Image (cartoon, rainbow, N blue to C red):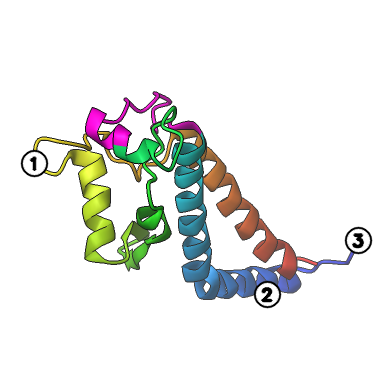
Amino acid sequence: MPDYTLETIQQAIEDSLGDLVQAFPSIVQKVGKDSIAKIRNRIQENGIDADGNKLRGYSTAYKKRKAKTQDTSITNLTLSGDMWRKTDIISAQQEGDKYVVTIGGKDDHAQDKIDGNSFGNGKGGGGNYGDILRVSEKEEEELGETFNEIIQEVLDKNLK
């Protein structure tokens, strides 16, 4: 175990703070990307919303259309996969003492699909599954663990 002095500990803390300030945007980006992957996997693989409820079935017309090419036993909000491929981090910025990451569609078409699936399209069909891009409590805990592990790696690097 290395010999620590007050000065070496103070320097390690200052170095860690500087490293964290510099790395924070990329850390937040990673956690944001991980959240998208968790949401997509939960819905595509299990057809489950953020509250753990099974997504209700597709409308009859949509189910017939989708059944031509895919299994319709799970409501996974995937026909072409375009909406999920184009779901990404839209913005990541510091707001006061918080860093806010917004996820959504990379283009208007993808965002329209996200909005339609989440809240309906105003045309009497589809959607109304609730905010499909919301993380579950379990996912939020897992993302918090990932965040903490990354922070710990930065701290450990400076306290060798």
Q: Nearer the viewer, mark 2 or mark 1?
A: 1
The residue that label 1 is drawn on is 123
Q: Measure the alpha-carbon separation of dots 2 and 1.
A: 61 Å
Q: Which residues are magenta?
A: 46-64
Please identify the quarter of the rendering in which residue 155 is found. Answer: bottom right
Give SS at disc 2: helix
Residue found 69% across the figure and 61% down from its top: 153
Residue found 64% across the figure and 68% down from its top: 13
User: Which circle marks residue 11 in the picture?
Assistant: 2
* Residue situated in front as seen by the camera: 41 or 97: 41
Q: Residues within 10 Å of mark 1 (few under 14, many from 20)?
A: few
Q: On the picture, is 116 further left or further right than 149? A: left
Q: Residues within 10 Å of mark 2 (few under 14, many from 20)?
A: some
Sequence-earlier tag: 2 or 1: 2
* Residue situated in front as seen by the camera: 14 or 69: 69
Residue found 50% across the figure and 51% down from its top: 37
Q: Position of residue 160 (x, y in %)?
A: 80, 67
